Image (cartoon, grey):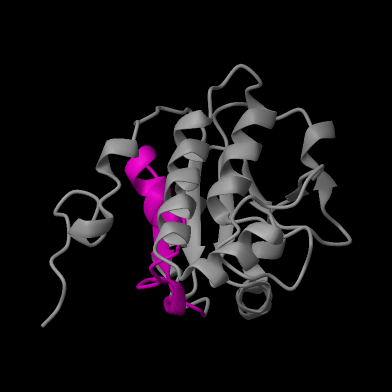
Amino acid sequence: MSRPDCPTCHYPLKACLCACIRRMQVKTELIVLQDPSEVGHAKNSVRLMELVIPETQVFVGETAEDFSALRLYLAESKKQVYLVYPSESSELANSSSLDEEVILLLLDGTWRKAYKLLKLNPWLADFPALHLDLESASNYTIRKASRSDSLSTLEASAMMLKVITPQQDVTPLTDALAALVEQRLASMPVDVRARYRENK
């Protein structure tokens, strides 16, 4: 028998995060290209993004054909489009002059899966890529990452929004993520929880 989910946040009722959700409005469009394996992942931060910023668009797939609707949307848009992904050709977002009304494309998955998305979709190379200046490791302690500069999609979005509009309050995003992390840690056995906190 499946556990009942909250009809609003879609997390299990025992793990409902509605009380921690504060909606925010932004002029920047956030579009997520999500690896199919992330859709039902309990720890996926994109679900929180959609709750905090309902205008967030999520396209699930792997190949260029899977993203045909997104490609058409971008082709018809008059906004500047940027891919948020660190590479040899990406520019530092903090050094770029970005308008508020731009479109940010974010790849959601592990580093390996995000790289696979990038390689399976060469059309993404048509857009300038941006990377963030990371001063600290990710606060998303409940997911393991192979790189010390790994960020959850929510964290990357919050940092990009702050770069574009310094006066933007992004705490609705970061607080929601912190609540998810604490909730997950609290549900772990004491010894496992201690190990995660040590790595924080």
Magenta highlight on residue 60: yes
| Quarter of the image that includes the C terminus | bottom right
What residue lies at 40% left-to-right and 72% top-to-bottom?
41
Q: Nearer the viewer, residue 72 or 195?
A: 195
Examine the image and state in which quarter residue 179 appears: top left
Q: Position of residue 42 (x, y in %)?
A: 38, 68
Magenta highlight on residue 87: no
Q: In the rendered view, does 191 fall on the left or right side of 87?
A: left
Residue range (magenta): 36-62
Q: Is residue 159 visible?
A: yes
Q: Residue furthest front?
A: 190
| Quarter of the image that includes the N terminus | bottom left
Above or below, comparing residue 152 to residue 188 in the picture:
above
Q: In the rendered view, does 102 fall on the left or right side of 7?
A: right
Q: Position of residue 107 (x, y in %)?
A: 58, 63
Q: Is residue 73 visible?
A: no
Q: Position of residue 60 (x, y in %)?
A: 41, 70
Examine the image and state in which quarter residue 192 appears: bottom right
Q: Nearer the viewer, residue 91 or 49?
A: 49
> What count of labels does the image hold?
0
